[in-house]
Amino acid sequence: MLKLRERNVWLGRAAADKAEAIRTVGRAMVESGFIEPGYIDSMLQREQVAATYLGSGIAIPHGLPAARHLVRATGIVVVQFPDGVAWADGERARVAVGIAARSDEHLQVLANLTGVLGDASAAARLARTSDPGEVIAALNGGASAPAAPQAVVPGGGTSIEVRSPSPHGLHARPATALVEVAKRFRAEIAVRHGEKTANGKSLVALLGLGAVAGARLTVSAAGDDAAAALAALDAAFAGGLGEAAAPQAPQAAPARPDRAPAAHDRAPAAAPLDYEGRVVAGISASPGLVEGPAWAFQRERVTVAETAADPAVQRRRLDQGLAGAAADLRQLHDELSKKAGAAKAAIFKAHLELLEDPDLVAAAHDQVDAGHSAGWAWRKVYEERAEGLARLDDPLLAARAADLRDVGRRVLRLLADSIESAASLPSHPVVLLADDLSPSDTAKLDPKQVLGLCTAVGGATSHTAIIARSLDIPAVVAAGPAALDVEDGQACILDGDAGVLVVRPTPRDRARAEVRRGQVLERREAERLDRYKPAITRDGRRVEVVANIGAPGEAQQAVDAGGEGVGLMRTEFLFLKRESPPSEDEQAEAYTTMVRALNGLPIILRTLDIGGDKHVPYLSMPAEGNPFLGVRGVRLCLERLDLFRTQLRAIFRASREGPVRLMYPMISTVEELAKAMAFTEEVRREIGADPIEIGIMIEVPSAVMIADRLAREVSFFSIGTNDLTQYVLAMDRQHPTLASQADGLHPAVLRMIERTAAAAREAGIWVGACGGVAGDPAGTVVLAGLGLVELSVSIPSIAATKALLRGITMEGAEDIARRALACGTAAEVRALVQGAQGVAA
Ligand code: PEP
Ligand code: MG
């Protein structure tokens, strides 16, 4: 455990500005032997990305991960600037805690720091003290003390005695369940274990109790509803806080309908953080935790003149705009009422009410009378009102702000001088917020400028989420309209692991996020160093870990990330972001580039999977009411043989350069497969290329049920769990509310996978998986245990997936898979995998 020492504490310093202060902190770190002098530049650069000011006069300067080689040893220094130094947004830092991290030894010191942050007087004392011992005592603290403030139930409270739940004590999941119950009550709730007392509403504090299974706990409550709170808590403990009695009994595990599955390639390695800022909950779509200013993505830019000559004309324009928008809303309301019922259409009624608000209209008229154009006047008024609403604490009223902006924009478009349809992209690092992003919008994002993204709608296995993962952009989807109700520039944390956007994070939120980020970086670094080692389980069974890619340049990235080939190249991505389809030569060049980059490693080129959520406007396909059940994937290719032929020719040309395999998506019948194979053979002969291995995606339930028949025709199967899940559970993979339940670890999906694997075994062909579940740690274990020999995952997940497989035994994975098949729900499967010692991350 790292300890702060007297020589690491510099008191009573002064600095003219932040740069000078950081150089002083850097000098202290150099003199302590923690860093090379070159690291100081990286500390200065870090501040450009995001200021390290935490709050309460405390900043934590440190370098960028790329400069980690300049860190000699993990260590912390504290430099006090009693007069303060301007650090960020008008905030002055008086205590700078310099961090050099090679490992996670410093995290406890940072965790102790979060305790100081929550206590303004303690922070002020640190800024003034002339006794280094006081700083050391505050930051070294108790090694296992919880970081959160401890709740002391005032006298008069009642208490109950309970036991910490089995089988693993008060760890993250049961503690979360406890917090959820506690938060339903106004009473202050404290949980005592031995000498330690924790706030019953703070996950971090509860975890800090270190209560093992069966430990005696005293739960106290004080407040007007204390008795009810204790009764509910007593019942929750009696029910095991949602824990199975033992991992062998998954049927007792909790369902957590409130928490979306981590339906992406890496689940959080630790308990979700218990944020204090405004939490907007969505679905976890791409992992990672970032902090940055909010930035609203607009697909169009509306321009309005500020002033106008004739107020009477502008008044008329404004009234016409309002009337036009009202007519649109009435029509939308009537159409939706007919299709989906009055309840669903009610939102448009509510929008109409906002439009007819007399105060709003009168305020806009006043602006017009003062010489402004109708558009400018209207925008000023509705934006001001929306901001006012958003500032209110009441979440219901805050949600009205999003409605008002929506209605406001509807009118504004009618009053615009011009509307540019080009999507605006950020020019500085931001957390991007959008109603929805199409796969093409997402593909245009620059990961350097988009630190994270959050959409109001969408699903975790939608192609937008898939692209975000491949770009390593943390993402939250399906967060609802509240995600749009954030002012541009507002500080946010985007926690892709937990699936939440945190607006206006508190200093403590930011400190904890920083600690978590450090942990993740350390773990990733260790995995990265071992990325070229094969994934061989502890009992000697190998699973191939290959990459899902979508662009020619990604083949080299896949190899560099430790990929043992490409298990899925989504060729349709070459067709997005363009005005016409790529020619045969263009495609041949793209595929050849990939084959060459792989230098002898295999690549599976999947033929076009256009349709569903991958819309390619220039193909002019007729709109379909239910595109996921329409002309999609191989069905489209069989209708558009011109496209299919061009692609197959290009693939056969590239196959001369190295081991290329061909795969058809969306096969649902024997006839489709036969037609596709016959056409492929015709094209092969035309080109004069050698035969190549042909496989199919298994992603439609009918294909599973006739897998034995299909297996006779092909060389391999690759299971597309993203689509298989949506079709088996009948839940659209991008549905804003259903997608959170569409978990690929649902036993119904697992049984389909099991059946597919059995058919493949019987026919003597190999079977892998390329859906998101393959790279989700629990999914990796279960799919390996079900007999899949190849897992194709997003590039950023390759090293982690290999590391996980190296840490387990196949025998254990097979045992888990068998038990998973007997579960009733996806939550039970996840609980089962997590409960299995030494298997999951
Ligand atoms: C799948 O469906 O799981 C799959 C890998 O294909 P896509 O996500 O491109 O539909
Ligand atoms: Mg699919």
Image (tube, grey):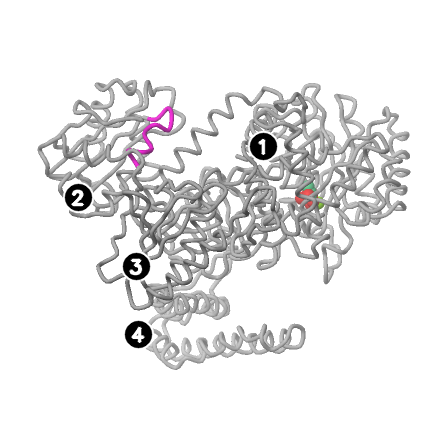
Residue 717 drawn above or below residue 179: above
What kind of element bears circle 1? Answer: helix
On residue 370, the disc is 4
- The amino acid pointed to by label 1 is Ile
Q: Residues within 10 Å of mark 2 (few under 14, many from 20)?
A: some
Query: Which is more foreground, mark 3 or mark 1?
Result: 3
User: Contact, CB < 8 Å: mark 3 with mark 1?
Assistant: no
Pointer 3 with pointer 4, Cβ within 8 A: no
Name the quadrant containing residue 695. top right
Residue 396 sits inside the magenta stretch: no
| First of labels 3, 1 by sequence position | 3
Determine the CA span between mark 1 and mark 4. 57 Å
Of the image marks 3 and 4, the number of the one nearer the N terminus: 3
Q: Is residue 458 left or right of residue 141?
A: right
Q: Which residues are magenta?
A: 101-110
Please give the residue where the numbered disc 2 appears in the rendered image: 122
Indicate yes or no: mark 3 CB to ligand 1 under 8 Å: no
Where does label 1 land, which residue? 795
Instruction: Tell me the kind of residue under disc 3.
Output: Glu
* Coordinates of residue 689 in the picture (x, y in percent): 85, 25
Of circles 3 and 4, which is in front?
A: 3
Q: Circle 3: is it few (<14), some (14-19), or many (20+) Cα within 10 Å?
A: many
Q: Residue farthest to the bottom?
A: 358
Q: Nearer the viewer, mark 1 or mark 4?
A: 1
Indicate the position of residue 691 as horizontal and vertical percent values: 86, 26
Q: Earlier in the sequence, mark 2 or mark 4?
A: 2
